[in-house]
Amino acid sequence: MFPDPLFRFLHVAGVAVWVGGMFFAYLCLRPTAGEVLEPPVRLRLWRGVFERFFRWVWAAVVLILVSGGAMMASAGLAAAPPSWHLMATIGVVMVAVFVYVFFGPYPALRRAVDAQDWPAAGAALNRIRQAVGLNLVLGLVNIAVGTLGRLLA
């Protein structure tokens, strides 16, 4: 029933990168950038930040899905605790939200910044902000389920 420590480490490391990155970006970088940078500079900053961060998110998503799947398989799908099934469901929703951002508003942000179309870039960034806010809440809920799930069952 207990997962291999390597899979647990990879899983938690992926979560730390993804959810920690969203926490930092949403609650620290975003408000400060909004206070001290003019829109063209702020939008170029976000374009560069997302370009780097999203590479790490893809790696984290792969780690999380592979390690989570391996842990579920090693426990036996039917024997896995209900909290694991809930974490998996929330995780799939989070991946769907990230895929939406990556293939939707993020390319729109890149194109608008490159064209110096600041209103369109701002609109795309706002859509990303909303999706990241949702994913941050889902990620924190998932951490709670992962750490407190057996207490709640």
Image: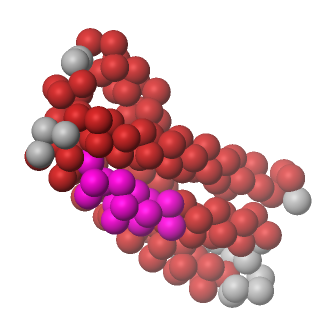
Horizontal and vertical percent for residue 61? 41, 65
| Residue 44 visible in the current orientation | yes
Residue 93 horizontal/vertical position (percent): 59, 65
The coloring applied to the image is: secondary structure
Q: Nearer the viewer, residue 135 or 80?
A: 135
From what the image shows, is residue 46 above or below residue 101?
above
Q: Is 97 rendered above or below residue 52?
A: below
Q: Determine the residue positioned at 28% across, 54% down.
A: 108
Nearer to us in this view, 142 or 39 = 39
- Report whether 130 appears left or right of 33: right
Q: Residue at x 48, y 73 (%)?
A: 65
What type of secondary structure mainly makes up the magenta span? helix
Confirm whether residue 52 shows in the render. no
Find residue 76 and report its image quarter.
bottom right
Whether residue 77 is situated above or below residue 128 in the rendered picture: below
Q: Residue furthest top?
A: 36
**Image position, residue 44 (x, y; %):** 17, 35
Locate residue 12 relative to residue 3 in the image: left or right. Answer: left
Residue plotted at (33% across, 13% down): 35
Residue 17 placed where, x, y %? 38, 49
- Span of residues in magenta: 96-109
